[in-house]
Amino acid sequence: MATTTDASPKFQSPDFRPLSSEQPNLRPDIHAASDLDGLPFWQYMVAGSIAGSVEHMAMFPVDTVKTRMQAIGSCPIKSVTVAHALRSILKSDGPSALYRGIGAMGLGAGPAHAVYFSFYEICKRSFSGGNPNNSAAHAASGVCATVASDAVLTPMDMVKQRLQLGNSPYRGVSDCVRRVFREEGLRAFFASYKTTVVMNAPFTAVHFATYEAAKRGLMELSPESASDERWFVHATAGAAAGASAAAVTTPLDVVKTQLQCQGVCGCDRFKTGSIGDVFRTIVEKDGYRGLMRGWIPRMLFHAPAAAISWSTYEASKAFLQQFNESDGHT
């Protein structure tokens, strides 16, 4: 995410790179002409928090449909399409059901994404060695970021998914938190943390590597207009990264949903809570296709969500950079 600004000078002047040696605190990046890196740590967190909140709030109804499709009950179930799931939710619970649990996500998304984006920026700066084309550094930085941010988001994500279920027994966020803590203990809030990290590590590695590569490729196609088309570049690269990563990791997302919703509204409760145990249960009840349940709404969520998140994040960084310059902080 750190490589966010105008790429054109590199392609216009072969003498651009030596200038970086005069500014050792700035990365010799292909975007260094109007560098938005080097922001204070707290500003990365603010930009990430805004991006994460906007992303999840905008796409929440799609996430609700995906959760309903993945929450397999005690009995084998027939395949359900996205349209069927949406009609069922609207018919049985009304349009408001699409937003049930959004309060929990509002509480969790901001802090989690603040951690997510700031950790990514810091790790990428450390791992890349000044090389903007280091895809391995981008992937590794993404993995570190998700391990940290998932620790923040997982409890509220569990609450959110339980509230999204049909006939959820909880009246709201606070009621769900109190009852889960009283009836199941603190461990219930982190029951899916290991699965979430196992899922999000490859998700984030694919996501960040794809995003950086797609962004670089798009800017190289038209370096002379890279500055004017910055929003389009970030949104397009983000959408490609989100869709690719979502498709690859859907089976683990199904497992995560099952763990977070176990014992609620007819969902199975698992003896060990291990990934293998849940995998076997899903395959026994719904076949291997059950591991891909909800993949369409998952991609429909992550493609636009990533486009919204990246473009919002980059716009926030641009605003903060301009604020710093106008305030005499740079």
Image: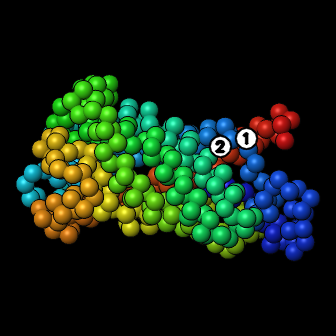
Asked whether the viewer can see residue 86, the reply is: no
Residue at position x 78%, y 54% in the image:
35
Say which of 207 and 311 sits in front: 207
- Report the number of numbered marks: 2
Front-most of 104 and 151?
151
Residue 216: quadrant of the picture: bottom right
Residue 31 vs residue 204, the one in the foreground = 204
Point out the residue furthest to the front here. 272
Q: Residue tagged by mark 2?
A: 44
**x%, y% of residue 146?**
49, 52
Mark 2 vs 1: CB contact within 8 A: yes
Residue 47 x %, y %: 62, 42
Q: Kindly identify the residue that appears in the image at 12 percent across and 44 percent down.
A: 266
Q: Nearer the viewer, residue 323 or 193?
A: 193
Quarter of the figure that contains the C terminus: top right
Left or right: 151, with 330 as reference point: left
On the image, the x and y values in percent for residue 8 come to: 78, 66
Q: How far is the residue under mark 2 from the one under mark 1?
A: 7 Å
Type of the residue with mark 1? Pro
Label number found at residue 40? 1
Residue at image point 69% right, 64% down: 128
Q: Secondary structure at mark 2?
A: helix
| Secondary structure type for disc 1 | loop
Residue beneath the point at 26% across and 39% down: 162
Numbered badge on residue 152: none
* Residue 265, picture quadrant: top left
Which quarter of the figure is the N terminus placed in?
bottom right
Q: Is residue 27 left or right of residue 42?
A: right
194 versus 178 height, above or below: below
